[in-house]
Image: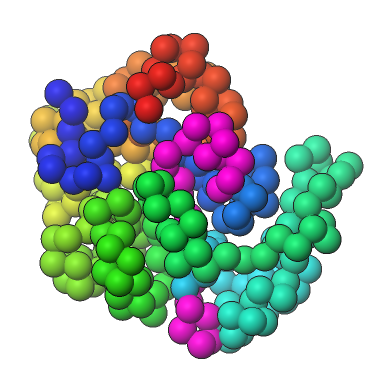
Amino acid sequence: MRQGGERSFLDSPAPIAFAHRGGADEAPENTLPAFEAALALGYTYIETDVRLTADGVLVAFHDTALDRVTDQTGCIGDLTLREVQAADAGYWFTPDGGQTVPFRGRGVTVPTLEEVLTRWPEVRVNIDPKADVCLGPLYDLLRRLDARERVCVGAFSDRRIARFRALAQGRVCTSMARNAVAIAWAAARLGRMPRFGADCIQIPVSSNGIRVVDAAFVRAAHRAGLQVHVWTVNLAAEMTRLLDLGVDGIMSDRPSLLRTVLIGRDRWLLR
């Protein structure tokens, strides 16, 4: 039986294929070219992170600062949107270990979350708010764009996700945070799974050297009515193992590879 209750975000046929950061190994992460490339492959789910600029605009960006993926420096929270979008978000991306930088100087910028949501109104978006300051603006934006039913919000921080749930009042799909997942994993050893107010569980394959996702965990989650989405899976063998366990979704930096694996199992045609 398909898990996920009545949440529209979770009603796609299993398994859900997520392009993590749009497909960070195949295009500059969290940028329009990355999202466009994933959608061209047939993806209907993308994953992104959000930060808030100094002038109160949510942007699709993972790190605290621009330094790692752009040609500029500085913290997102200290910069205006105009300053953030002056950076070349494709500057450092390389698909071949540094031999080429095909997106450098091509005008790739850091997109706003509003741009992502309005550009592709049918696409479902998994959103990780990277700081508490994002929460109010995030819910306000989702409400204004009538996008609450097509997103899932997840965060590492239990306090942050609890605060978002208080704002959303049950109107937005949310996943389990880190401490709740740890308790859920221990409970799964006994065949139980507390929900902690979550609609799904989004977890890594392993944590601190412990393999989190195994048959007992997936069974317990499904008995509790929770979908299991696993990140960030970039090897075909691991994708295959997880699919054999019956996970409900996989997030990958390599959307082309995940698509190939799903095609090989006759599961891509379901989306």
Residue 158 appears at what percent x and percent y?
Answer: 27, 63
Q: Residue at x 39, y 37 (%)?
A: 230
* 30, 112: nearer the viewer: 112
Residue 93 appears at what percent x and percent y?
Answer: 75, 51
Residue 246 appears at what percent x and percent y?
Answer: 29, 22
Task: Give the image's coloring scheme.
Answer: rainbow
Q: Quadrant of residue 18?
A: top left
Q: Locate residue 14 relative to residue 59 in the image: left or right.
A: left
Q: Residue at x 28, y 63 (%)?
A: 146
Q: Quadrant of residue 253?
A: top right
| Residue 231 sits above or below residue 108 on the image | above
Q: Residue at x 22, y 58 (%)?
A: 172
Question: Total label count?
Answer: 0
Q: Is residue 65 visible?
A: yes
Q: Locate residue 208 relative to residue 194 in the image: left or right.
A: right
* 217, 134: nearer the viewer: 134
114 drawn magenta:
no
Residue 73 appears at what percent x and percent y?
Answer: 72, 76
* 149, 128: nearer the viewer: 149
In magenta, the rendered stretch is 35-57
48 drawn magenta:
yes
Rendered-image quadrant of the C terminus: top left
